[in-house]
Image: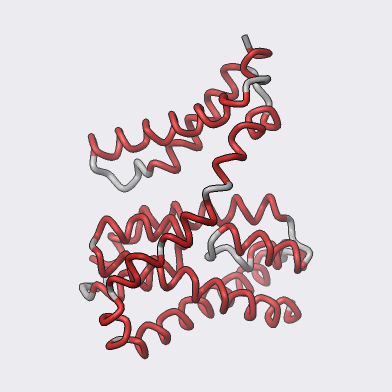
Amino acid sequence: MDKMLSTSVFFGVFASIAGYEIGLLLKRKFKLALFNPLLIAIVVVMVILAGTGVDYESYNEGAKYLSYLLTPATVCLAVPLYQQLSMLKSNYKAICGGIVAGVLTSILSVLGLCVICGFDHQMYVTLLPKSITTAIGMGVSEELGGLVTVTVAVIIITGVFGNIIGEAVFKIFHIKEAVAKGVALGTSAHAIGTARAMELGEVEGAMSSLAIAVAGLITVIGASVFANLY
């Protein structure tokens, strides 16, 4: 059975989609942020691979095709942004300031934690792009000499964590402005945070979509500069 599954091109795709659908089902049923569909999908895929004995390389032979959809999906985020263009024009100063502040906070927090924990330079540059979308973060990590696979894992963890705690943070600090919520989620939790922002509203989703792109570009520049500081 495991040999048949490992040689099937569709196994990886099926396992990934099945895991995500289970996550969506749990999220709708219990309505808890902890049941994040992506987080549940990761756990389900791990259980499936462990139960069937299929190794990761065989699974990824099929699952990798889902990654091809990442770039066009990111580009499609421009649609809600275009629909909220007037909102962007009237709040561009606050939006730009928020994104820059978010990027600097992300980079400086990584620098501070690496100093405190005694991480080496390679781990430092591996963690620098933790808050930007995977498509950009992988390139930044590779260019700086980081561990790309670890970068991908950290980016996913950051996004899932931001998706889970985002709304709670807004309530604690009494953040009610839709623009602020969108910028915060997009800057700190990239595409996964944007998925949550779109659930909150159209304005939140549009601002988060913008934040992903702008934060990614600023991080590319910022990471190159800050990489030499440690």
Give percent across and percent down for residue 65. 59, 39
Between 86 and 146, the residue placed more toward the observer is 86
**Residue 26 at x, y percent in the picture:** 30, 34
Q: Position of residue 42 (x, y in %)?
A: 50, 37
Name the foreground residue: 24 vs 40: 24
The C terminus, quarter of image: bottom right
- Across and down, in percent, residue 123 comes to 72, 61
- Residue 10 lies in what quarter of the image? top right
Instruction: Tell me: 105 left or right of 208.
Output: right
Q: Where 52 sits versus 18, above or below?
A: above
| Along the line of sight, the residue nearer the viewer: 63 or 175 | 63
- Residue at the location (62% across, 9% down)? 1
Which residue is drawn at the image coordinates 73% and 56% (left, top)? 147
Q: Residue at x 58, y 55 (%)?
A: 154
Q: Is residue 23 above or below residue 159?
A: above
Q: Residue at x 68, y 63 (%)?
A: 139
